[in-house]
Image (spheres, coloured by chain):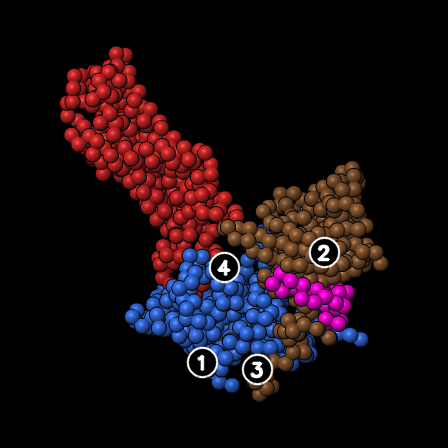
Chain colours: A red, B blue, C brown
């Protein structure tokens, strides 16, 4: 049975996939449905939702269209989430593979560095990095990856430790393959599946960290972000709670969707492995 | 006989097993002449696989010396060791485990040709086809995934990969033990044919005396990390002197005939 | 002798990826009480599927035609009680976190209804029967502390613990070296004779099979090619496939493949 059919069998996975599909559709449709700059003024300030159907979710303190902000914010969340996960998995898998394959002193040094990064809370690391280098989308991505690569590194190392004892690695050494080629061509691709299984958790965490950074005013100032919207609404939390609640719900749904779809994917591939 | 191709002298290796030191190799010495098959035979734990892996530098020894093709094999490192590997190859027991599960037949044959610069890239597909034909396989097999071909075909591919670099010695570690009996005979014939045409020497690791008798010139019987008996294969098997040799002969499965 | 097991027109198909693969086709034979039957075949012959089908251990989703009957029992057999199973890899059938004594005593308790103390004594007796040196201390050992051959002896002790009427040994000696293999085969033969158990000895090695079996059944591509007395199969095989298996056997009397001057 194909992976996709297995995946679609579990209701949670389907729910997750639907949420993600909606999110991606929002991100893609944002420039088409709301071609104007989402940060420009669209109407009167603090218009509540469902009053004016040209501004269905109302406006914020500066009179900006909340729905347009929500759509454009989805772009930021997806971009940051995926880029941060890809970066941290790339860094983590590389370091984990080198540590596990080389062993000895290299392993010791790399794993102590990993320990050091892991003991500092990821969010603090991101906060410090962004405040020093200055907020921009790329910096935010690197800042999040800085705290998130340790998990993939550990999983990759554990996997590599078992793979490097296999006959096909011995066979690669026997034909005279360079150790770096063995590590990255023979070992790493076979160590990746459990590392990739972490990606949904990392994407979800990255979206939350990005929102938190934006909430603290450390997001990219030229982009709409859901965290920024929540922060923006905080000043008028009593009079206009919807300004914080709407992006908050979007955030919760997104993280939930990523998590459910990720779990479903891991389950489906595990089931396929059992069958074969 | 001509000068030995490989001389192993005083090989020593000690493992820690459950807090107890075990001598996997205890002063093991042997020689292999060019174009000769030496079988290392013994029960499990006798040290024969450790000896094979040590020669391939997959396991580091505690002591001893190995001269291969007039080089000090154990002293070689890095690029020089990798270069020597072209002349010293190995075929593993389980052809399924010995290949990257993601590889295709073409890729596993391309690797040795590329690494040792034997054939320029443009002519490699033809060289791969030739290798496949040499081991009795169709060149069409090149595009197939390794996990998608039969066990016998896989072991032929493993042999093709080993001979790609024109080695002088191939270590065969239980290389036919996992194969069906009908396939086993064909693979042994192939190995003998390669030996005759390319003067390859084999170090044949096995616990199966029947197979050893069929293809080995000489045999060395190992037990508990030591070589307990050596000699011509037919002679040793017909009239073993050591107790291990006698036990192996007695234990070899024999067809029960009428009467 | 009474008939212990009747296999009638047995067919098994596995379903997977939308395809159905027939692994056993139209297999019929009888196994008598106390008889030792060897099942010989190469990979893909269906010999292991046959064992699983008889033990009722086929994976979910497999389709079974025909039937397997136990005339003496008159009911479906209970695994462990009526039927003992020894697999190729003893480490996969033994629980790594239980001592040898706990595992065997558990089987004894479950099937013979003994109390723990009695069951342990029985387990020690069984370990003695499979010739494990020092059964008393082996009771307290964990599987990883034993060698491959010793683990296989423990697996055999567990398989015969409840005095089953059929013992199935599926490539039970294939992972062992020839010396240990010969010992284990001898042990199985002795136990089977002493207890009057019927034996199904599944193997790829026709010589080994001929040493232990009364009758040999040769399988190929899921079909029963030929079945007969062991000596008849070895000396006067009827089928070309059996002949080719015999020809492929490499014994100590097989001529060397090397040229004569090379062996001298």
The residues bearing labels 3 and 2 have C-alpha atoms spaced at a distance of 47 Å
Label 1 marks a residue whose chain is B
> Which residue is disc 3 drawn over?
C258
What separation in Å lies between label 3 and label 1 (alpha carbons)?
15 Å
Of all residues, the one furthest to the top in this rendering is A239
Magenta-drawn stretch contains C20? no
Give, as a single range, the part of the protein colored magenta. Answer: C208-235
Subunit of label 4? B
Q: Which residue is mark 4?
A: B97
Residue B256 lies in quadrant: bottom right
Q: Residues within 10 Å of mark 4 (few under 14, many from 20)?
A: some
Query: Can you give x and y, in whole percent of width and height, for residue A265 in the image?
Result: 43, 41
Q: Note whether residue B132 is visible.
A: yes
Closest to the camera, between mark 2 and mark 4, is: 2
Q: Is residue C228 magenta?
A: yes
- Residue designated by label 2: C8
Tell us which disc is closer to us: 2 or 1.
2
Residue at x 77%, y 50% (from the top left corner): C70
Q: Marks 2/1: CA distance? A: 54 Å
Q: Quadrant of residue A234?
A: top left
Q: Are marks 3 and 1 in contact (CB under 8 Å)?
A: no
Above or below A142: residue C69: below
Q: CA distance from mark 2 to mark 4?
A: 38 Å
As displayed, is residue A99 above or below residue C25? Answer: above
Q: Is residue C187 visible?
A: no
């Amino acid at each position: 049975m194909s992976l996709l059919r297995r995946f679609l069998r579990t209701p949670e996975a389907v729910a997750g996939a639907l949420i993600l599909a909606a999110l991606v559709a929002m991100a893609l449709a944002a420039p088409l449905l709301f071609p104007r700059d989402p940060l420009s003024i669209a109407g009167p300030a603090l218009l509540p939702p469902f009053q004016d159907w040209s501004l269905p979710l109302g406006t914020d303190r500066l009179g900006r269209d909340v729905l347009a902000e929500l759509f454009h914010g989805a772009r930021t969340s997806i971009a940051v989430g995926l880029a941060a996960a890809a970066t941290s998995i790339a860094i983590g898998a590389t370091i984990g593979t080198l540590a596990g394959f080389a062993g000895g002193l290299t392993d010791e040094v790399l794993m102590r560095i990993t320990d050091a990064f892991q003991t500092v809370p990821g969010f603090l690391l991101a906060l410090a990095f962004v405040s020093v280098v200055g907020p921009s989308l790329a910096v935010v991505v690197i800042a999040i990856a800085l705290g998130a690569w340790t998990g993939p590194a550990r999983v990759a190392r554990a996997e590599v430790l078992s793979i490097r004892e296999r006959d096909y690695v011995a066979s690669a050494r026997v034909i005279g393959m360079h150790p770096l080629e063995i590590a990255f061509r023979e070992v790493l691709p076979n160590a990746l599946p459990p590392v990739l299984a972490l990606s949904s958790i990392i994407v979800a965490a990255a979206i939350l960290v990005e929102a938190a950074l934006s909430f603290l005013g450390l997001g990219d100032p030229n982009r709409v972000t859901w965290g920024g919207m929540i922060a923006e609404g905080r000043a008028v939390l009593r009079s206009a709670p919807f300004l914080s609640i709407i992006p908050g719900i979007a955030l919760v749904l997104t993280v939930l969707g990523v998590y459910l779809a990720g779990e479903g994917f891991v389950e489906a591939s595990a089931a396929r492995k059992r069958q074969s | 006989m001509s000068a030995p191709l490989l001389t192993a002298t005083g090989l020593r290796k000690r493992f820690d097993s459950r807090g107890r030191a075990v001598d996997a190799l205890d002063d093991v010495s042997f020689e292999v002449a060019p174009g000769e098959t030496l079988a290392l035979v013994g029960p499990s734990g006798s040290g024969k696989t450790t000896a094979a892996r040590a020669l391939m530098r997959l396991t580091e020894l505690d002591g001893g010396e190995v001269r291969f093709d007039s080089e000090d094999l154990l002293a070689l490192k890095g690029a020089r060791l990798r270069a020597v590997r072209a002349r010293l190859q190995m075929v593993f027991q389980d052809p399924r485990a010995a290949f990257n599960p993601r590889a295709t037949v073409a890729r596993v044959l391309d690797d040795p040709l590329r690494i040792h610069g034997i054939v320029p890239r443009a002519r490699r597909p033809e060289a791969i086809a030739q290798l496949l034909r040499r081991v009795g396989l169709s060149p069409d097999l090149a595009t197939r995934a390794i996990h998608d071909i039969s066990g016998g075909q896989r072991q032929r591919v493993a042999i093709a990969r080993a001979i790609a670099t024109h080695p002088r010695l191939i270590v065969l570690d239980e290389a036919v033990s996992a194969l069906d009996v009908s396939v086993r005979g064909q693979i042994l014939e192939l190995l003998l044919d390669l030996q005759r045409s390319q003067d390859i020497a084999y170090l044949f690791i096995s616990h199966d005396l029947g197979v050893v008798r069929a293809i080995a010139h000489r045999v060395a019987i190992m037990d508990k990390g030591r070589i307990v008996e050596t000699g011509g294969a037919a002679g040793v098997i017909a009239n073993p002197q050591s107790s291990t040799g006698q036990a192996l002969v007695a234990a070899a499965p024999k067809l029960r005939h009428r009467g | 002798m009474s008939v212990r097991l009747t296999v009638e027109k047995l067919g098994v198909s596995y379903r997977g990826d939308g395809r159905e693969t027939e692994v056993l086709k139209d297999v019929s034979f009888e196994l008598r009480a106390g008889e030792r039957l060897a099942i010989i075949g190469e990979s893909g012959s269906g010999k292991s599927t046959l064992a699983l089908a008889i033990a009722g251990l086929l994976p979910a989703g497999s389709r079974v035609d025909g039937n397997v009957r136990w005339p003496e029992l008159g009911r479906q057999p209970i695994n462990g009680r009526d039927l003992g199973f020894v697999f190729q890899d003893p480490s996969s059938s033994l629980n790594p976190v239980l001592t040898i004594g706990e595992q065997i005593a558990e089987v004894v308790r479950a099937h013979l209804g003994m109390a723990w103390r009695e069951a342990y004594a029985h387990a020690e007796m069984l370990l003695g029967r499979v010739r494990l040196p020092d059964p008393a201390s082996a009771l307290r050992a964990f599987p990883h502390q034993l060698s491959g051959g010793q683990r296989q002896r423990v697996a055999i002790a567990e398989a015969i613990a409840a005095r089953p009427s059929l013992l199935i040994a599926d490539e039970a000696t294939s992972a062992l070296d020839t010396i240990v293999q010969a010992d284990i085969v001898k042990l199985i033969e002795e136990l089977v004779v002493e207890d009057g158990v019927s034996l199904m000895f599944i193997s790829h090695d026709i010589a080994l099979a001929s040493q232990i079996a009364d009758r040999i059944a040769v399988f190929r591509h899921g079909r029963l090619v030929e079945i007969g007395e062991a000596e008849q199969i070895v000396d006067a095989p009827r089928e070309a496939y059996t002949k080719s298996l015999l020809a492929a056997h490499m014994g100590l009397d097989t001529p060397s493949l090397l040229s004569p001057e090379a062996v001298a």
